[in-house]
Image: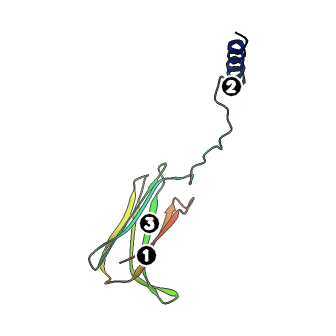
């Protein structure tokens, strides 16, 4: 009997120590950008061709500009292979990209954007074909 009472008392005490509402110990997640709602970049290969794609979308009615650059690794440096750009106004998404013969090697695609001269999100990806 005494053992049962001790177990029940321990269970009751453990429930009283648990909060009844979620505790705010988590860090608040901040958006990566203030004026950009979406940035997409992809470098893929179709045989000996590099396929580059980039899209940026403003979070409001700002103009958008996007530049994609494809580089080939050349020793310790990088050589420009191709360049694409795109733009949009009034909050529409801006797209840039294309397909270019590259053969084999290591390539880097960089993406640079301008959202209404307020924000300049960027991205970079390196892949080997």
In the rendered view, tell whether residue 8 sits above or below residue 80. above
* Residue drawn 65% across the image and 41% down it: 26
Looking at the image, tell me whether mark 1 or mark 2 is earlier in sequence order: 2
Place residue 102 in its image quadrant.
bottom left
Which dot, 3 or 1, sits closer to the camera?
1
Assess disc 3: are there few (<14), some (14-19) or many (≥20) residues with their C-alpha within 10 Å of its C-alpha. many
The tag on residue 79 is none
Residue visible at 64% across and 29% down in the picture: 22
Horizontal arrangement in the rendering, residue 51 relative to residue 61 (left or right) = left
* Quadrant hosting residue 65: bottom left
Q: Earlier in the sequence, mark 3 or mark 2?
A: 2
Residue 69's tag is: 1
Residue at (42%, 57%) from the top-left corner? 89
The 10 Å Cα crowd at callout 2, few under 14, some 14 to 19, many 20 or more, is few
- The residue that label 3 is drawn on is 66
The x and y percentages for residue 14 are 70, 23
Of the pair 84 and 54, the residue shown nearer to us: 54
Q: Which residue is mark 2?
A: 18
Q: CA distance from mark 3 to mark 2?
A: 51 Å
């Amino acid at each position: 009997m005494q053992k049962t009472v001790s177990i029940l008392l321990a269970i009751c005490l453990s429930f009283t120590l648990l909060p009844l509402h979620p505790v705010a110990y988590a860090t608040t997640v901040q958006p990566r950008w203030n004026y950009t709602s979406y940035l997409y970049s992809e470098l893929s290969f179709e045989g000996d061709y590099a396929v580059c794609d980039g899209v940026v979308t403003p979070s409001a009615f700002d103009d958008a500009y996007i530049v994609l650059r494809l580089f080939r690794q050349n020793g310790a440096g990088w050589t420009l292979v191709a360049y694409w750009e795109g733009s949009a106004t009034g909050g529409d998404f801006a797209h840039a990209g294309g397909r270019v013969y590259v053969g084999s090697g290591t390539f880097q695609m960089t993406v640079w954007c301008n959202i209404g001269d307020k924000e300049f999100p960027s991205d970079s990806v390196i892949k080997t074909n």
